[in-house]
Amino acid sequence: MTPLVNCPGRFLLMASLSLSRVWQYLAALIVSPGCKVSNRRTPRLSQKTVLIIFFAGRMTLNFFATVVVVVVPIVVAAVVAAVVVLVVVVVVVVITIIVVVEEEKDEEEEKNKKKKK
C-alpha cells in the first residue's frame, strides 16, 4: 500500500522532507512509541504509519512522522508568537488606559485648585 514516487518533482519534494536519518529515527519513535527499536539503523516500521519508500541511497521516508516533526515545531512557534503579540498588545492597552486615567485625574485636580482660588 505504499504510493510510488514516479514524478521527479514529487521525488525531490519527498527527499527534501526527509531531512536526515536522525530526524526519521526520532519521528518514528514519536509516531509509533509502542514499536520496539531494532539494532538496525532505523526503527521497526508499523502499519499505522504512512510510508513512502524510494530507492535513492536506501532512504525510507516515514512521511507522516516527518510531517509531524517538521509541522509541529512550526505550529508551536506560531502559537507562541501569537501569545507574545497578544500579551504585548494587552500590556500596551493597559498602560494607555492608566496614563489616560492619570491625566484625567490631574486635570480634575487642576480644575478644583482653580475653583478654590
Image (spheres, grey):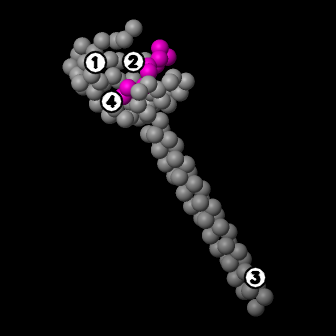
Report the residue that reaches farthest toward the right.
116
Of badges 3 and 2, nearer the viewer stands 2
Of badges 3 and 1, nearer the viewer stands 1
| Residue 41 counted in the magenta span | yes
Residue 61 percent coordinates (x, y): 35, 23
**In the depicted view, which residue is nearer to us: 45 or 6?**
45
Q: Is residue 80 visible?
A: yes
Q: Are marks 1 and 2 in contact (CB under 8 Å)?
A: no
Q: Amino acid at mark 3?
A: Asn
Local packing at callout 4 (Cα closer than 10 Å; few below 14, some 14-19, many 20+) is: many
Residue stretch in magenta? 40-49
Q: Is residue 67 visible?
A: no
User: Mainly helix, strand or loop, the magenta region?
Assistant: loop
Mark 1: which secondary structure?
Answer: loop
Residue occupied by mark 2: 51
Alpha carbon of mark 4 to alpha carbon of mark 2: how far?
A: 12 Å
Residue 31 percent coordinates (x, y): 49, 27
Alpha carbon of mark 3 to alpha carbon of mark 1: how far?
A: 83 Å
Residue occupied by mark 3: 112
Q: Are marks 3 and 1 in contact (CB under 8 Å)?
A: no
Local packing at callout 3 (Cα closer than 10 Å; few below 14, some 14-19, many 20+) is: few
Q: Amino acid at mark 1?
A: Phe
Residue shown at the point (33%, 22%) measured from the top left:
60
Q: Amino acid at mark 4?
A: Ser
